[in-house]
């Protein structure tokens, strides 16, 4: 039975998981959930933290949330190889983990600080301190990029897919300046050429654009 994913295409972490599944050729059963639906009795039983994405792998009697944890699980369990999340090279894996934790703990938190006031209607523009936080986070990412094409080195990894979902969302409301973030822009353009990028992200990116247009 295909693992089931509770998701919403507006959510960057959900889109990261959609890309991971495509990258390893895994079919998921998708069930869309709105923000309000996450706090029903039934959903709280599944994930008391009331976040999406949530994955239910019935064959394994296993439920897991947090996109980064889901991504690692899917590659380990369903990937033909573990090139997206190598386990033999512990330094490479540590580097990928650092990027994943950066996406989770820093970047996504700053995206939320920028976009939630618009979503909640408490502001009609990205607050200045949130914008400063985003610029700083993008600067960190620019400095993480060496001469390799991907954040974990020569090969694409789940860290790239998590960061692609986040940075492509930021780009919608915060165009990246060429002279400030040249390596990040090259990496982003490389990511946009992935065969599944548009399919997994377009609807969510357009919804983010609409949110900004109507704020
Ligand atoms: N670190 C989590 C973040 C998940 C998250 O915050 N998802 C948002 C949607 S983008 C959500 O479910 N928000 C609803 C809530 O927190 O009640 C992940 O990577 O999955």
Image (cartoon, grey):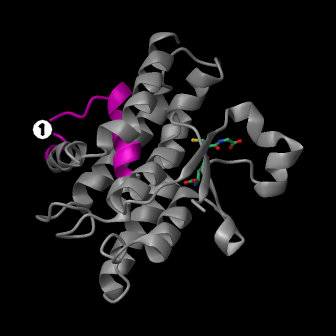
**Which quarter shows the N terminus?**
bottom right
Residue 15: x, y in percent? Answer: 46, 45
What is the span of residues highlighted in magenta in the rendered image?
A: 163-182
Name the main secondary structure of what is drawn in magenta. helix
Look at the numbered disc 1 and say if its residue's Cβ is closer than 8 Å to ligand 1.
no
> Disc 1 marks which residue?
179
Q: Residue at x 38, y 54 (%)?
A: 22
Residue 53: x, y in percent? Answer: 60, 50
Examine the image and state in which quarter residue 82 appears: bottom left
Asked whether residue 48 appears in the rendered view, the answer is no
Report the front residue among 105 and 12.
12
Classify residue 94 as left or right of residue 27. Answer: left
Q: Is residue 178 magenta?
A: yes
Q: SS at mark 1?
A: loop
Examine the image and state in which quarter residue 45 appears: bottom right
Q: Residue furthest front?
A: 1
**Mark 1 Cα shell of 10 Å, populated few (<14), some (14-19), many (≥20):** few
Q: Residue at x 50, y 48 (%)?
A: 13
Looking at the image, is 90 positioned above or below residue 4? below
Q: Residue furthest top?
A: 214
Report the front residue among 147 and 6.
6
Residue 64: x, y in percent? Answer: 65, 64
Q: Residue at x 53, y 57 (%)?
A: 67
Q: Is residue 173 magenta?
A: yes
Q: Residue at x 53, y 12 (%)?
A: 215
Asked whether residue 156 appears in the rendered view, the answer is yes
Classify residue 178 as left or right of residue 127. Answer: left
Looking at the image, is 207 positioned above or below residue 31? above
Residue 16: x, y in percent? Answer: 44, 50
Examine the image and state in which quarter residue 48 appears: bottom right
Looking at the image, is 211 positioned above or below residue 26? above
């Amino acid at each position: 039975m295909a693992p089931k994913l509770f998701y919403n295409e507006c959510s960057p972490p959900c889109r990261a998981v959609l890309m991971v599944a495509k990258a390893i050729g895994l079919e998921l059963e998708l069930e869309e959930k709105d923000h309000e639906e996450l706090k029903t009795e039934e959903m709280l039983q599944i994930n008391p933290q009331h976040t999406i994405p949530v994955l239910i792998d019935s064959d394994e009697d296993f439920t897991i949330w947090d996109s980064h944890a889901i991504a690692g699980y899917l590659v380990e369990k369903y990937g033909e190889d573990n090139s997206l999340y190598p386990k033999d090279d512990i330094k490479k894996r540590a580097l990928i983990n650092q990027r994943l934790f950066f996406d989770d703990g820093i970047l996504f938190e700053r995206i939320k600080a920028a976009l939630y006031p618009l979503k909640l209607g408490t502001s009609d523009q990205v607050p200045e301190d949130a914008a400063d936080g985003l610029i700083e986070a993008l600067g960190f990412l620019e400095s993480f990029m060496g001469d390799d094409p991907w954040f974990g080195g020569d090969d694409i990894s789940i860290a790239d897919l998590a960061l692609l979902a986040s940075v492509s969302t930021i780009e919608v409301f915060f165009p990246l300046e060429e002279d400030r973030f040249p390596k990040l822009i090259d990496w982003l353009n490389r990511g946009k050429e992935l065969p599944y990028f548009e399919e997994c992200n377009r609807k969510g990116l357009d919804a983010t654009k609409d949110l900004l247009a109507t704020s």
